[in-house]
Amino acid sequence: MSDNYVVIRLGSLGDVLLTTGVLGYWYETRGWRFHVVTRSGFSGIFKHHPAVREVLPVSPHQLTARGWWDFCRSLEKTHSSMELIDLHVNLRTAFLRHIWTAKVRSYPKLGLGRRIYAKTGLSAFKKRLIEKNVPQRYAAALSQGVPDQSVLTPRLYLKPGEVLDAEKRLAALGLGGKIICLHPYATHQAKAWPSEKWMQLIDLLEAKGLDWIVIGQNRPPFLSSNPRDLTNQTSIRETGAIIRKCRTVITGDSGPMHLASAAGTPVIGLFGPTSREWGFYPSGPRDILIESNLSCRPCSLHGKAPGKCAAKCMHVLEPELVINALNKIKSSTLS
């Protein structure tokens, strides 16, 4: 077996972040190194990662039909002496697997099982889906047996200078101590916690004397006139460094949820149309998921709920639940 592999994961920010702990695990237990194929915008995730020899970025142009053909042909010529690990597994990567010269491995995506469970809620599918989270499924591509979730948590390798810059940035805003980081955005509207709930939460935080900031990418920013809203102002690594200086990140089912895990900061996750059965939940020892028990959940694989859905599953989650979760995290930190 080779000690060098080409691994591919495109998708969203969270999808890619969830590979970082798996690559670290393989490196630490087997000494394997990786040439990572991912979207160019996510290259920074792997900077300073000890398991990564190089990042092979895919530009938006290269994701077009002709661009992808050319990219795959070029990659096959330069890297196909190594085994390929497909952690994406879709029609796009099927072409790369088809032309690859060396051995190809992939992970159990459980796509059919997820779709059946979303439609039927059958307990047999629920049991299988809940057995392994997504990093454990990734690890199954190369590992015999299933590593514990705790050794596969996402990782972001920040340099001391990056963390110091984040500390200075927060100090310039008059923020000190442990700050509550808010991410009020979602790729799909049904996964978004209502704006009025976020505002109520901010009022509760301020009543408890807690500082807060807003991070993320969105047009427009949540609080465009407030200097504590850093929306669209930070890169992935800068955001990760800021998160590291925070006590907790409060977010929906999102990429920054996994960025918080990678930065080592506890997460309070607000889940609605999606659910932990999909395997994308934060798995840190102090992470807390807040979700309703509505019978219609989960209704979507990615959070794009049916057209008539009013996202009641998000509306019923009250800010007081978040405060209670925050108190639990604080207590666990002190104990």
Image: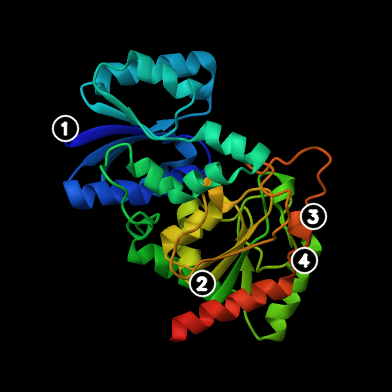
Between circles 2 and 3, the one closer to the viewer is 3
Q: Is residue 164 left or right of residue 195?
A: left
Q: CA distance from mark 4 to mark 2?
A: 21 Å
Q: Residues within 10 Å of mark 3 (few under 14, many from 20)?
A: some
Q: Residue at point 64% right, 78% down? A: 324
Query: What amino acid is at disc 2?
Result: Cys
Query: Quick one: label 2 or label 3, which is nearer the N terminus?
Result: 2
Where is mark 2, residue-wise?
Answer: 246
Between circles 4 and 3, the one closer to the viewer is 3
Q: CA distance from mark 4 to mark 3?
A: 13 Å
Q: Residue at point 73% right, 41% down? A: 305
Where is mark 3, residue-wise?
Answer: 312
Where is mark 1, residue-wise?
Answer: 2
Q: CA distance from mark 1 to mark 2?
A: 40 Å
Query: Quick one: label 4 or label 1, which is nearer the N terminus?
Result: 1
Query: What amino acid is at disc 1?
Result: Ser
Where is mark 4, residue-wise?
Answer: 197
In the rendered image, the quadrant that contains the N terminus is top left
- Which is more toward the observer, 278 or 124? 124
